[in-house]
Amino acid sequence: MMMRDWCVGMAALTLAGCAASSEQAPAPAPVVNTLWTGQTVAGDAPAAGSRFELMFGPDGRISGRSGCNSFGAGYALNGAALQVHPPIIGTRMACSEAVMAQEARFLAIIETATTASVGTDSMLTVTGPDGRAIRFAKADVPSNQSSSHANSAMPMPTPSHVVMRCGDEQLRVRIEGDTAEVVLDDGSEMVLPRLEGETGAAQTYTNGRMTLQRVTEPQHGFRFARGRMALMPCILAQN
């Protein structure tokens, strides 16, 4: 009888211990409907001034921040198997060279990603076909915002102006769609349409009196000119 009571007691303690350990190991956050913040991109920590975020929406769309810009695309997730449907669309702001270079790596991994899974460490890992990966942690979202994040993918914010110095002039520039909005030192505003039929790494916006060119290769940047003057490189003053 004493032996039986001892066995029953030990079994109860074992079950209690198992229950306690399970309570200490919460289930990892689901991939969908969770806002994730980037911790590493291809093994590197985020560059200074960058912001990496990712959300898989229940509507089959992903959205987030790719370092400098906002982006969005369609996706299909079957278990851990991920396929992102091109094209990836996004804003076209310019940041520092380090941020833009890391953004290019981030988008290359996202666009060709083959898997997305949450590990036992509660980190989300998105991996490309070449083995390069982006690691994300679950973002801390205030309780009064959690329901809105759960119901829809993160919206792509309207891009703000980029401040840059081009020679002796300081410009505030925003590129949206096929136009470039340029605000001059005196507060006057010009809207420059993009030239049609361009190919290659340069995007040119001009009204005949003023020309702004955005270059994406070999490095991201802007060039500016008035009239028939030669295009001069611009230096970013702030984001």
Image (cartoon, rainbow, N blue to C red):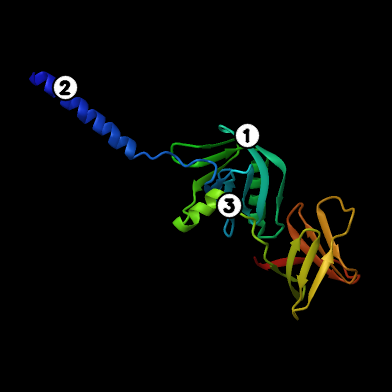
Q: Which residue is mark 3?
A: 52
Q: Is residue 25 above or below residue 195?
A: above
Q: Is residue 184 above or below residue 119?
A: below
At label 3, the amino acid type is Phe
Q: Position of residue 24 (x, y in %)?
A: 33, 40
Q: Position of residue 45 (x, y in %)?
A: 54, 50
Q: Is residue 73 visible?
A: yes
Image quadrant where residue 10 sits: top left
Q: Position of residue 68 (x, y in %)?
A: 64, 57
Question: SS for tag 3?
Answer: strand
Q: Which residue is mark 2?
A: 7
> In the orientation shown, which residue stands out farthest toward the left?
2
At label 2, the amino acid type is Cys
Compared across the picture, whether 191 is left or right of 10 comes to right
Work out whether mark 1 precedes mark 3 in sequence or the reverse, and give the earlier one: 3
Residue drawn at point x = 57 percent, y = 51 percent: 53
Question: SS for tag 1?
Answer: loop
Question: For mark 1, does the 10 Å Cα neighbourhood hold few (<14), some (14 to 19), or many (20 or more) residues?
Answer: some
**CA distance for labels 3 and 2:** 54 Å
Q: Which residue is mark 1?
A: 114
Q: Position of residue 19 (x, y in %)?
A: 29, 34
Question: For mark 3, does the 10 Å Cα neighbourhood hold few (<14), some (14 to 19), or many (20 or more) residues?
Answer: many
**CA distance for labels 2 and 1:** 50 Å
The quadrant of the image that shows the C terminus is: bottom right
User: Closest to the observer: 5 or 114?
Assistant: 5
> Which label sits on residue 211?
none
Q: Check if mark 3's residue and mark 2's residue have beta carbons within 8 Å.
A: no
Compared across the picture, whether 117 is left or right of 201 comes to left
User: Closest to the observer: 48 or 68?
Assistant: 68
